[in-house]
Image (cartoon, rainbow, N blue to C red):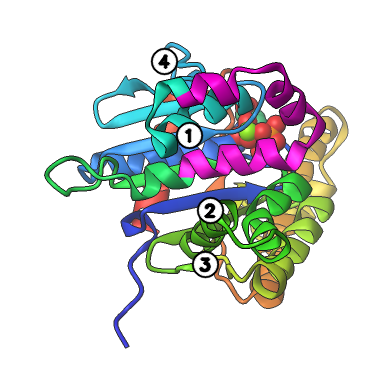
Amino acid sequence: MRAMPSLLDRRLIVVIGKGGVGKSTVAAGLALAGARKGKRVLVAEVNARERVSVLLERRPVGHEIGQLEANIDAVNVEPRAAMREYALMILKFRSIYNAVFENRMVRYFLRAVPSLAQLVMLGKILYHVNETLPDGRPRWDLVVLDAPATGHGLLLLRLPQVLATSMPSGPMADEAHKMHQTLIDPRRTAVALVSLPEAMPVNEAIELNRQLRDVVGTPPAALFLNGYVRPRFSPEERERLRGAPGPLADAAQAVLSRELRAELSERYANKLAVDTELPPILLPFLFTRRFGRAEIEQISQIVESA
Ligand SMILES: Nc1ncnc2c1ncn2[C@@H]1O[C@H](COP(=O)(O)OP(=O)(O)OP(=O)(O)O)[C@@H](O)[C@H]1O
Ligand SMILES: [Mg+2]
């Protein structure tokens, strides 16, 4: 059996986890790491608010693909723009598109059937994963999908399979089937879980891992434990801090709180390793006034060496 390509050598990385755990941070870090390796990267967000360009301190790109910087393009995928673009890519003929997709019924459907909107957004992204240039090379070497939080993200990944099996056979079912094949192909696609060393995000990551394995058929390839805090003091030193006298007591308490965070970080890393069978990649909590490009650079270095 051939060895599985490393994370950055896949064609698609789907970053998924509970809300606020650092998905966009990891997605931006992966993009930088990929670009440093000379890959042409496309970062796709499917959120209402564009985050990756902000984290990388670049101008927003919006709903059309635009360049963030050398080797990194980005797009904030939105249903209607995706529908238009996807339909044009598939149908090729603008006149048909205009007749079919600019009409009020379709707009109505996109709003009324959220799964259709989701399918179109995912379809556009997977199209780019497999898109080639006239000379046969892939247009992008790596697509990073900053997926919606837990439940919505899972739904997005399940959708092609659900639709492929529930729709009557025909072009739509074929399309959904092809999308599912791309998602479950470990040579092309990797799912990366993100968690924080806290109870709820960890439980969600464990549950997500189970569902991705058992229901979607995409066992995660990597697990990032973000916001990791390492201990600074030995148990003996901590004991002495506990007895700090008078004016130092508050400062000692602050240090001890941080040490507790470190203890929890380690405990949750162990729990995740046992329950998901993935060795967590530890991303440190970065104490900074403004979380931006410099921090993403740091994260990307760790991502790259992991
Ligand atoms: N390693 C870290 N150290 C310190 N702060 C961090 C770290 N990672 C993320 N943050 C902070 O948490 C914020 C949220 O991170 P991010 O936007 O990546 O989360 P998310 O999972 O994408 O959130 P959402 O679910 O809303 O999309 C960041 O803007 C940053 O301020
Ligand atoms: Mg985000």
**Mark closest to the chain's N terminus, 2 or 4:** 4
Mark 1 and mark 3: Cα distance apart in space: 21 Å
Q: Residue at x 30, y 22 (%)?
A: 69
Image x and y of residue 265, in percent: 69, 56
Q: Quadrant of residue 188?
A: bottom left
C-beta proximity under 8 Å, tags 1 and 4: no
Mark 2 and mark 3: Cα distance apart in space: 20 Å
Please give the label number shown on residue 86.
1
Mark 1 and mark 4: Cα distance apart in space: 26 Å
Q: Amino acid at mark 2?
A: Pro
Q: Is residue 115 magenta?
A: yes
C-beta proximity under 8 Å, tags 2 and 3: no
**Mark closest to the chain's N terminus, 3 or 4:** 4
**Mark closest to the chain's N terminus, 2 or 1:** 1
Q: Is residue 287 above or below residue 23?
A: above
Alpha-carbon neighbours of circle 3 within 10 Å: few (<14), some, or many (≥20)?
Answer: some
Q: Amino acid at mark 1?
A: Tyr
The mark lying in front, picked from 1 and 4, is: 1
Mark 3 and mark 4: Cα distance apart in space: 33 Å
Determine whether, in the image, residue 164 is placed left or right of residue 189. Answer: right
Q: Is mark 1 within 8 Å of ligand 2?
A: no
Please give the label number shown on residue 58.
4
